[in-house]
Image (cartoon, grey):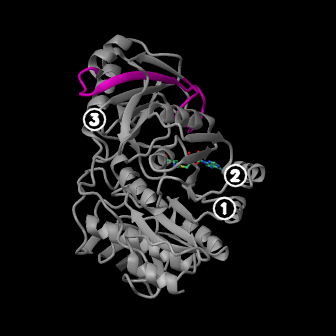
Amino acid sequence: MKKNDILRLPIEDLSAEGEGIGKADSFPFFVKDALPGDLAEVRITKLQKTYGYARLLSVIEPSSDRVEARCPKARACGGCQLQELRYEAELKFKTKKVADALQRIGGFRVSGEPGGEGIYVPEALGMADPWRYRAKAQIPFGYDRDGKLVAGFYAGRTHDIIDMEDCLLAPEETAGTLRAVKAWMLEYGVPAYREDVHEGLVRHLLFRKGFATGEIMACLIVNGSGIPHADALLEKLRKVPGFKTLTVNENRARTNVILGRRTETLYGPGWIEDRIGDVRFRISPASFFQVNPVQTAVLYGKALEYAGLKGDETVWDLYCGIGTISLFLAQKARRVYGVEIVPDAVRDARENAALNGFQNASFFAGKAEEVLPAYYAEHPEEKADVIVVDPPRKGCDRALLDTVARMAPDRFVYVSCDPATLARDLRIMDGYGYRIAAVQPVDMFPNSRHVETVCCLYHQKKDFISVPYEPKNAEYLKKN
Ligand code: SAH
């Protein structure tokens, strides 16, 4: 076999990246846009020692899970990897991804059904309507080869902008906002930024919507200190239902980082508000806020259930961002401490605590793996009943897990955006005597390959923690 050879491949599996996997003479190929069950015609694009990559030329016989992509740009755009997979099958894929990681990376025994021998991973909790769920879109501007103004998304792994009018993962108002900005640029000759020569003005439109409030924010990121004809832009934006605020962010650097440091408010308060459950959040252009607020309520509801709070507990929320989980927990706990590395996020967390009238939540700026041991050393008498972590993809720092083990909380709740690092960290915690009582994948990003997982651990020496969601599995764990 060599590059450019054409093969017929039966696709058998999906990679963690969402590519179809098919074998030719037991040599595996990764094929973007191919799905398990497809018989695919492919061309080899790259050969490594033990695997290769191939491009999908045509689907000879489609998988029974194959559906037509709703978005005409689905294959070209880097945003969605699984639009052509039926949603039920997508949820199964995500569930399996978590179970596989626990088994292969964590070395845990995994059971296919509740009550079996091993950890049972129930199906990922999905959305009733897995479209238009994103509370935020960052849309780059530029020019195509013919010099036409374009705005849309980067094609997978490149900086070529795919022009788009509407993204089906974003709310409808995104399209209206984008149309307004484009019309204003064309009408007043406002230039888009050109990355190659570092010239021009408009780099990105940052769009945010509060799902519970309907409030809309537009933030233009510009290579300059302001925008011309701002009134004309405002007039157009006011027609977007829910439009609340317009800000301009200055970013003159030659960088892939989207936001610069200075933001000026041109209209409205400069922020929007949203609610997750009963907790209110104020969101500025630079704030980190969960992308899918509807599923965030599901995920945090699960985390709260796993925390098993009765009202007198001391709880730590590590990697707390703007305090989303912390404030969820503060509704039920005596005392919540949040730790977050980004000082601005900590400021937001404090403001959000005040906005909601919580006096039992405090926040520390710093590395979780440094703040927690330092605090514990100073207050060895203060018991942590529950510790929650929600780390970035690389997972928890080892020093942090060591400290958690020393603090010996009754429960340890792990929220994870990467099953591989989750499995690695759970294995470490297993070494400290922490057993898995329940695992629940949650689909926060329908149509993409990403999956979130929330996991409840308890110490084997403590009384068994019953997690109502999976009692049979819990029984098994109790015995072992
Ligand atoms: N729980 C929050 C945010 C989770 S994202 C929410 O749901 O909104 C992970 C967060 O961890 C980010 O805000 C990131 O800034 C923070 N972070 C990354 N490394 C960290 C570290 N070593 N210590 C503390 N926080 C860290």
Which class describes the residues within 10 Å of circle 3: few (<14), some (14-19), or many (20+)? some
Q: Position of residue 407 (x, y in %)?
A: 68, 61
Closer to the camera, 392 or 159?
392
Q: Position of residue 228 (x, y in %)?
A: 42, 12
* Residues at circles 3 and 1 in contact by the CB criterion of under 8 Å: no
Q: Nearer the viewer, mark 3 or mark 2?
A: 2
Asked if one can make out residue 54 in the rendered structure from this viewpoint, the answer is no
- Of mark 1 and mark 2, the one earlier in the sequence is 2
Q: Residue at x 42, y 54 (%)?
A: 300
Numbered mark located on residue 372 in the image: 2
Query: Would you name the residue on which mark 1 appears?
Result: 404
Query: Would you name the residue on which mark 3 appears?
Result: 175
Residue at the extreme right = 377
As shown in the figure, which amino acid type bears the numbered disc 1?
Val
Asked if ligand 1 lies within 8 A of label 3, the reply is: no
Closer to the camera, 247 or 210?
210
Q: Residue at x 66, y 61 (%)?
A: 404
Assign a secondary structure to mark 3: helix
Asked if ligand 1 lies within 8 A of label 1, the reply is: no
Residue stretch in magenta:
238-262
- Of mark 3 and mark 1, the one earlier in the sequence is 3
